[in-house]
Image: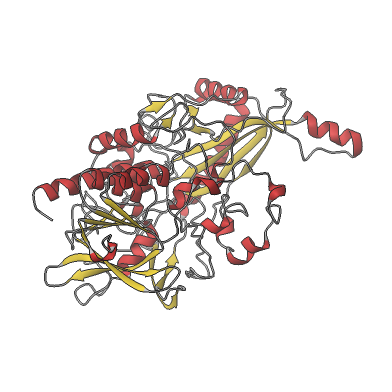
Amino acid sequence: MAQDPLQQTYDAIVVGSGATGGWAAKRLSEAGLKVALLEAGRAVTGREFTEHMPSFQLKYRNHSPEVMRTRPIQRQCYACMEYNYEWFVNDLENPYSTPPDRPFTWQRLRILGGRSLVWGRQSYRLSDVDFKAASRDGYDVDWPFSYSDLAPFYDIVENYVGISGAPEKNEMLPDGQFLPPMKMSCGEIRLRDSVKKTFGRTVTIGRTAIVTQPHNGRAPCHYCGPCERGCMTYSYFSSPFTTVKDALKTGNCTLITDAIVSHVDMDVSANKARGVTFVNRTTKETKHVRGKTVVLCAQALESTRILLNSSTQEYPKGLGNSSGLLGHYLMDHVVGGSASATFEDMQASPSANPPHRPNGIYLVRFRNTPAEGKHPHFIRGYGFQGGSMPDFNMDAAGIGADYKKAVKRGVYGVSLGAFGESLANLDNFCEIDPNLKDAWGIPALRISMAHGKNEAALMRDAAITGAEMLEAAGAKDIRLTTGTEMPGMAIHEVGTARMGNDPKKSVLDPFCRSHDVSNLLVTDGSGFVSSACQNPTLTMMAITVRACDHLVERFKRNEV
């Protein structure tokens, strides 16, 4: 008879099965540790992917009132639709609160793999201009390690995941281990060459976690496009079919689904974590699992929620919160600054059934760089994501046959949208709302965040520089947006349990270990000291591998 998985004591309990949780489970179980991997949602199979299903086969033709009713917040995410809305949390069961004047959109999934099933897959390294930004401009503090410390772990992640991209030798965006890059369109090549010649700036094809050749048993991308609905060839990286699969294959990893973790359990006499308590998602039974270490990978806000709900007499303000900083310094990239236009002199007939390249272009940060120097109006910087392709002109004028001809003639569009750095701010935070619980009786978060003057200045500048670059490339009918979107819209939440060397000024040490509880780790985006302007997931995965390798060495030395 098989042993009850809840009666065992594991070497490590990993909470969360997404990009970081999958890596933690893989790295620890392949090193020989016995791992329990807890996921709040159900399992997922490739059979439910719908990237090739036309909308007319859906009950509501992708205009489902069910999505609108139970996912009023989740539908703000571009990826939440009738095809896949059940992957996302039911907002009515999973509430959180915000102050009336500080709205925040928290977009999240509860299913094996989490947001790795629907993420944008853009994968960029941070540089020492990011890790040591405070030393350059005097704002806040540096990260407790440098690029050279993390570079070997970036290599490990990229070589396994499969990142397609092109080397550029740009100090702001370190090159990595790349599979062959996807091809740029004619409009993108035109923009790239113009931007380099006129401004000396770098436009490159997006570096994306999608394989362009056979890689680790996964087939190359076949350009079908809607990756947020799944990928039955597993060409894009998602944890259930890569890291989690590998962890389970070792025989050292036990997967426990439908396990909504409420808090970390403590052995008070030893000042160590001894496991976690969770509520079964379907039965609502309370259960426990025990382990020698606990590794939280539930996503920045959710991991912090677990720690805040784990308060004890010794840690009344949340577990591992002797610094008082747990929940503070919440960051999300600022978005809203953009420029778009048309290349009127480029002729290309659009097609109703073209290949859909699931990737765009990336324009590397050029503000406040060692080469450019200090900008007079703001610190840090932004990068652009965008693209240029022919498409049907649905805004064409006319009626009847003339209208149809104009639509089919199409328009060659080009656009650039900025992702700017969100400054670490003590007043951007999350805490437990004393009057709000989820459907499982677990106290919910109150999230309070607003973008500041620096973020607004970044987006104004991004719109102007974007327009200047499009104009220099010969684009016409240029349109700008200069505002800032509500925090959370970038879906790049980081911070809330920052790393540092000083326990009085940080929550985690440089290896993501709690300063207060030596066998408790948090390896998702919680530990970020600054947000930089690059998409964070690649860095989260590299940090997780580094932290887990350090944990394995501690096990070998009998320090756990």
* Closest to the observer, 241 or 190: 241
Query: Does residue 551 sit above or below 195 in this rendering?
Result: below
Pinpoint residue 458: horizontal percent, then vertical percent: 48, 45
Query: Does residue 73 sit above or below 83 in this rendering?
Result: below
Pinpoint residue 549: horizontal percent, then vertical percent: 21, 44
In the rendered view of the protein, which quadrant contains the N terminus? Answer: bottom left
Residue at 46% x, 45% y: name it.
420
Residue 309, image quadrant: bottom left
Pinpoint residue 542: horizontal percent, then vertical percent: 31, 41
In the rendered view of the protein, which quadrant contains the C terminus? Answer: bottom left
Pinpoint residue 513: horizontal percent, then vertical percent: 21, 55
Q: Left of 515 or right of it: where is 237?
A: right
Q: Left of 68 or right of it: where is 246?
A: left
What colour scheme has been applied to the protein in the rendered image? secondary structure
Residue at 8% x, 48% y: name it.
557
Residue at 72% x, 48% y: name it.
56
Q: Left of 401 or right of it: where is 482?
A: left
Residue 373, image quadrant: top left
